[in-house]
Image: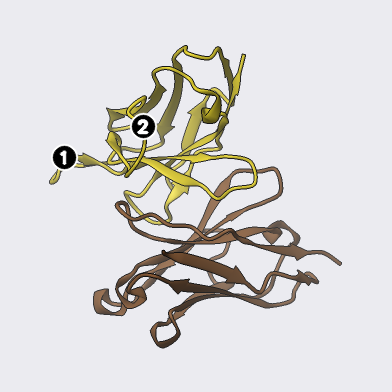
Chain colours: A yellow, B brown
Amino acid sequence: DIVMTQSPDSLAVSLGERATINCKSSQSVLYSSSNENYLAWYQQKPGQPPKLLIYWASTRGPGVPDRFSGSGSGTDFTLTISSLQAEDVAVYYCQQYYTTPFTFGQGTKLQIK
Amino acid sequence: EVQLVESGGDLVKPGGSLRLSCEVSGLTFSNAWMSWVRQAPGKGLEWVGRIKSKTDGGTTDYGTPVKGRFTITRDDSKSTLYLQMNSLKTEDTAVYYCNTDSLVRNLWGQGTLVTVSS
């Protein structure tokens, strides 16, 4: 199975500041024939199911604010929130869908400083 | 409006069985690839498995911890997804979510709680 490792496990950022979450996969999730990275980011708020934020490593999902961006390729990826808002407090997960079983990172808890 | 409603969660003893259901409305269920994801209390997300649409073969894939014990099926006539769980272990205790296995229309239910305890 592909192992997904996120860092840090938790993060506290001031309102309006940048938040950066990293995700590393144990093998490349870049599909060479399409040049697409099979990597998604999810946001989960307390008591709610997850919400898909980013797919193909950098494509925002419908209705996702443009302060959320994804980057990276191969085995190293980053989720960036450019200007943290109060409603962004949540746990964030990366997931690879390159090969089954699809696997999630352990999650990063984002809080307000 | 699309709705996914899970049901069937319960308290069950180790070694027991349980079947979860996920009733879907508001989309063409027969065309949808569907997945189950679980979350143990206070823990992260774990992919359980998925089933493709029948037109795409209807095949299933499973996460390593549940392979051989869990089975995903679908009844397109009832727009319902199922998760049959056998030989349950205490570590299977979790909220189980169904979701559409789609990037552009990724929709989730609210989950159903399965507790495995003696």
Check the image and name the residue furthest to the front. B1
Task: Kindly identify the amino acid type of the residue bearing the numbered disc 1.
Answer: Asn
Contact, CB < 8 Å: mark 2 with mark 1?
A: no
Residue B35 appears in the figure: yes
Q: Position of residue A107 (x, y in %)?
A: 55, 35
Q: In the image, is residue A37 above or below residue B116?
A: above
Q: Position of residue B77 (x, y in %)?
A: 40, 87
Question: Mark 1 — on which chain does it sit?
Answer: A
State the residue at coordinates (49%, 30%).
A6
**Rendered image: mark on residue A101:** none
Secondary structure at numbered mark 2: loop
Q: In the image, is residue A24 above or below residue A52?
A: above
Task: Kindly identify the amino acid type of the residue bearing the numbered disc 2.
Answer: Pro
Q: In the shown orientation, is residue A29 left or right of residue B21?
A: left
State the residue at coordinates (75%, 63%).
B115
Q: Which residue is mark 2?
A: A65
Classed neighbour count for the residue bearing mark 2: other residues with Cα under 10 Å, few (<14), some (14–19), many (≥20): few
Real-space CA distance between mark 2 and mark 1, rounded to the nearest whole angstrom: 25 Å
Q: Which quadrant of the rendered structure holds the C terminus of chain B?
A: bottom right
Q: Quadrant of residue A2?
A: top left
Q: In the shown orientation, is residue A51 left or right of residue B85?
A: left
Nearer the observer: mark 2 or 1; the answer is 2
Check the image and name the residue furthest to the right. B118
Q: Earlier in the sequence, mark 2 or mark 1?
A: 1
Q: Which quadrant of the rendered structure holds the N terminus of chain B?
A: bottom left
Q: Which residue is mark 1?
A: A35
Asked if marks 2 and 1 fall on the same chain, the answer is yes
